[in-house]
Image (cartoon, helix red, strand yellow):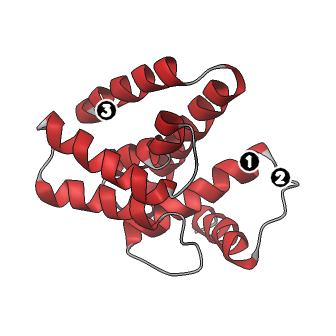
Amino acid sequence: MKRYLEIEKIVYQELEKNCFGNKKRQGYRHLFGVSTLCIAYSQYVQLDCELCAIMGLLHDYSVYKNNTSFNHAQLSSELARKMLEESFLFENEEIDIIVQAIKNHSTKNKVHDQYSELLKMCDVLETYYHDPDCIFDEYHQKYIEKASLLLNK
């Protein structure tokens, strides 16, 4: 998880620089919450824990860096690729896994690779845990049910 800590520093700096008040609080809660859930659930599906933690941390990065959610999955994936490549800490295959999951995470109505599906599930769960009365469409609801099934294995 040493590489995760390096990426975490960059995210901390960006949140401190660009976000204030509720936006900063929401950024810390959501990015680190999704990352923590990705770590926990990666164990159940036997995916690389560190890659999962990093994809969770960076999945909405552009929302807080650019202060807009417009096209955020695509923009976050581009920012993640640049950050990971410039860190010189990751193999190209690892970068591709993280970037692809981030790019796919907003498309809840389509099934993608295991890493993308884990990120989608953890993204939905973090929202659900902080607002259990939130109304989800059938695609989001499917991820809440999937998480419950994983815990009950």
Residue pictured at 51% horizontal, 58% vertical: 71
Look at label 2 and name its amino acid.
Answer: Pro
Contact between labelled residues 2 and 1, with CB atoms less than 8 Å apart: yes
Residue 150, x across and y down, in percent: 57, 66
Farthest residue, direction right: 133
Counting residues from the start of the chain, the first of labels 1 and 3 encountered is 3
Query: Quadrant of the rendered structure where residue 67 is?
Result: top right
Residue pictured at 31% horizontal, 57% vertical: 99
Between tags 1 and 3, which lies in front?
3
* Element type at mark 1: helix
* Element type at mark 2: loop
The C terminus appears in which quarter of the rendering? bottom right
Residue 22, x across and y down, in percent: 71, 26
Residue 101 to residue 57: above or below: below
**What residue would you read off at disc 1?**
129
Residue pictured at 50% horizontal, 18% vertical: 16
Look at label 3 and name its amino acid.
Answer: Ile
Residue 100, x across and y down, in percent: 33, 64
Residue pictured at 30% horizontal, 54% vertical: 48
Tell which of 2 and 23 is nearer to you: 23
Look at label 1 and name its amino acid.
Answer: Tyr
Q: What is the CA distance from the residue labelled 1 to the residue labelled 3?
A: 25 Å
- Disc sitting over residue 132 in the figure: 2
Q: Crowding at label 2, few (<14), some or many (≥20) Cα neighbours within 10 Å?
A: few
Counting residues from the start of the chain, the first of labels 3 and 2 encountered is 3
Q: What is the CA distance from the residue labelled 3 to the residue labelled 2?
A: 30 Å
Residue 139, x across and y down, in percent: 67, 76
Going by the image, does 72 lie left or right of 103?
A: right
**What residue would you read off at disc 3?**
7
Q: What is the CA distance from the residue labelled 1 to the residue labelled 2?
A: 6 Å
* Element type at mark 3: helix
Tell which of 109 and 150 is nearer to you: 109
